[in-house]
Amino acid sequence: MKMEPKDTKLICVKLYISESRNSSALDMIEQASKIDPEAAIVNKFQDRNYNRVRYTLVSYVVHDAVAGITFSPMRRTLLAMVEAAYAAINLEMHSGAHPRLGVVDHICFHPLAQATLEDAARVAKLVASDIGIGLQVPVFLYEAAHPNGKALDAVRRELGYYRPNFRGNQWAGWALPEILPEKPDEGPVHVTRARGITVIGASPWVDTYNVPVQSTDIPAIRQIARMVSGRGGGLPTVQALALVHGDDRIEIACMLLEPNQVGADQVQSQVEQIAAQEGLEVEKGYFTDFSQDMITERYMKLVYGE
């Protein structure tokens, strides 16, 4: 199905995979993504300390309300990438400084251009079924893809996502029971240790912004992260996590759930103010992805030459 640019309802997908050190594994995943030219990778962010990669993909979506059918090349492309990831990566052999629950750790869908959140959620649920039922990997849904709109951080907390299980600040192997205490939204309650589980959701746009602090005092930086986050009484709609990043710094990794209301400048300022009271030096933070407009622009150039 060939879409004309003027007609396109676009969705953006952030695919997070627990690997960044094995280049041959990433090559396999990227080769698998080339199954349909209208579902394209527009950005890639990888971090060796976190041992994690994020692919940003864009494609069109169409929905036939009468027939109740949703189609997007994204579905087939994601399934190919996920299958390649499972073939190339073993979670039992994985370790890194970023929390994760599976080889394919997180897939989030966002509407772009003329698409709606409901469009994104429809495709998210189809992909969840492909992975959960088709590949027999437990899948937990969140926000617009979840029947009750359950928040991502609530899903993660119930599953122990934020609890390191190695050296006090690292995550290694599979750490949860093989029979899950919570029934997943798709797929079996039994976990294959080599694959883990996957969390999939649809939400309005979220910015991810990391602020490096020159310190090795993880308890102190965790306290700063708590004070910055909405949950800790700081900035509303901000979620923050302190993660070791190399030998001499810790990053405060932030999710800005409503970036038009509370943006990166406010996060940067808040971290600097609190850190200054502790005599800590803060570096300039960075976004881990492009803006919505830039992502759309890159896709249109890649696919339609516009």
Image: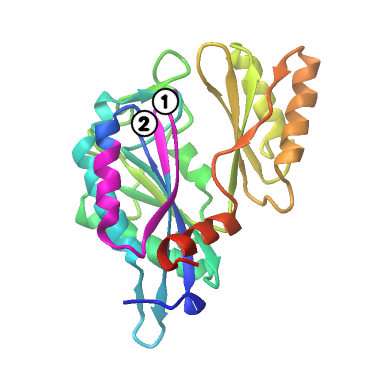
Screen quadrant of the N terminus: bottom left
Element type where label 2 sits in the image: loop
Element type where label 1 sits in the image: loop
Q: Residue at x 22, y 33 (%)?
A: 194
Q: Which mark is residue 128?
A: none
Q: Earlier in the sequence, mark 1 or mark 2?
A: 2
Magenta stretch: includes residue 53: yes
Residue 19, quarter of picture: top left
Q: Residue at x 36, y 81 (%)?
A: 68
Mark 1 residue crowding within 10 angstroms, few (<14) / some (14–19) / many (20+): some
Q: Please say whether residue 119 is visible from this viewpoint.
A: yes
Q: Which residues are magenta?
A: 26-54
- Nearest the eye: 95 or 46: 46
Distance from the alpha carbon under mark 1 to that under mark 2: 6 Å
- Nearest the eye: 162 or 244: 244
Residue 261 x/y as whole percent: 74, 52
Q: Which mark is residue 48?
A: 1
Residue 38 is left or right of residue 155, and the answer is left
Q: Residue at x 33, y 37 (%)?
A: 102
The answer to whether mark 1 and mark 2 are in CB contact below 8 A is yes
Residue 170 x/y as whole percent: 43, 20
Q: Please determine whether, in this image, residue 282 is positioned above or below residue 17.
A: above
Type of the residue with mark 2: Ser
Q: Which mark is residue 20?
A: 2
Q: Please say whether residue 190 is visible from this viewpoint.
A: no
Type of the residue with mark 1: Arg
Residue 34 is left or right of residue 281, and the answer is left
